[in-house]
Image (cartoon, grey):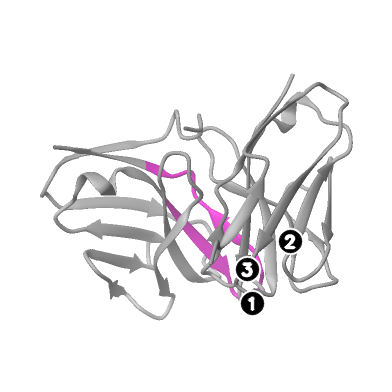
Amino acid sequence: GESVGLHLPTLSVQEGDNSIINCAYSNSASDYFIWYKQESGKGPQFIIDIRSNMDKRQGQRVTVLLNKTVKHLSLQIAATQPGDSAVYFCAEKVTGGFKTIFGAGTRLFVKA
Amino acid sequence: NAGVTQTPKFQVLKTGQSMTLQCAQDMNHNSMYWYRQDPGMGLRLIYYSASEGTTDKGEVPNGYNVSRLNKREFSLRLESAAPSQTSVYFCASSERRGSYEQYFGPGTRLTVT
């Protein structure tokens, strides 16, 4: 697979436990926040998004929380599975703009 | 549907050589993007095309050119490759300009020696 992500923050969890991946975003004018998952050798894959007027959004086994006061975003994965092992990126889109700004990513290891 | 496809998957170039990375999408998306991904960093936007016939610079456009050949295809050209362009390149598409849900190709790993 690619060598990207060699120096990323790493989270290691036991299979079946819940995972929480955190992200600090940079621009208070951002109106959309997105989580992407990138498995080794593949391109990023959209997981879930949240608008800036929301605090929480749930998907299948995933929940995104947004705290605009401290510009913090988190992704919670319930009952983490080995297939969840990947690099997770948060991204923000600035209001009125085209650009999506990606964070550096967090590597999640799931121990069987 | 194949989604977003990229060719080649791997490429090694010598400094000063040129090459074109190809990208195609079959989702009838209007917008297409080229990113590069370096170790320990997120994706950085090189160029984007909001719609067929238009292209614009992103965050790191120097040393690259693009062509939106038609609605399906968006190519990235390196005219004179440099070691600093060693990276993994991803093409993406979205239904509309700046859409948060972008669909990515599998990437091209480029090494410039």
Name the residue carrying label 3.
B26
First in residue order: circle 1 vs circle 3:
3
Is residue A15 on the magenta stretch? no
Q: Is residue A4 left or right of residue A80?
A: right
Amino acid type of disc 3?
Asp
Q: Residues within 10 Å of mark 1 (few under 14, many from 20)?
A: some
Mark 1 falls on what kind of element? loop
| Coordinates of residue A95 in the picture (x, y in percent) | 59, 74
Chain letter belonging to callout 3: B
In the rendered image, which quarter is residue B15 located in? top right
Q: Which residues are magenta?
A: A89-106
Query: Which image quadrant is residue A86 in?
Result: top left
On whether disc 2 and disc 3 are found on a single subunit, the reply is yes
In the image, residue B46 lies at what x, y percent?
72, 50
Q: Are marks 1 and 3 in contact (CB under 8 Å)?
A: no
Report the residue marked by disc 1. Answer: B96
Q: Residue at x 48, y 52 (%)?
A: A44
Q: Label 1 lies in what chain?
A: B
Q: How far apart in space, not on screen, are marks 2 and 3 (Cα)? A: 17 Å
**Relative depth, front residue between A97 and A14:** A14
> In the rendered view, does B54 fall on the left or right side of A69?
right
Quadrant of the frame with the C terminus of chain A = top left
Q: Which mark is residue B48?
A: 2
User: Marks 1 and 2, how far apart in space?
Assistant: 12 Å
Spatial CA span between label 1 and label 3: 15 Å
Tell me the quarter of the picture where residue A63 sits.
Answer: bottom left
Q: Residues within 10 Å of mark 2 (few under 14, many from 20)?
A: many
What's the residue type where badge 1 is placed?
Answer: Arg
Instruction: Residue at the far bottom: name it.
Output: A53
Residue A110 % position (x, y): 21, 40
* Discs 1 and 3 share one subunit: yes
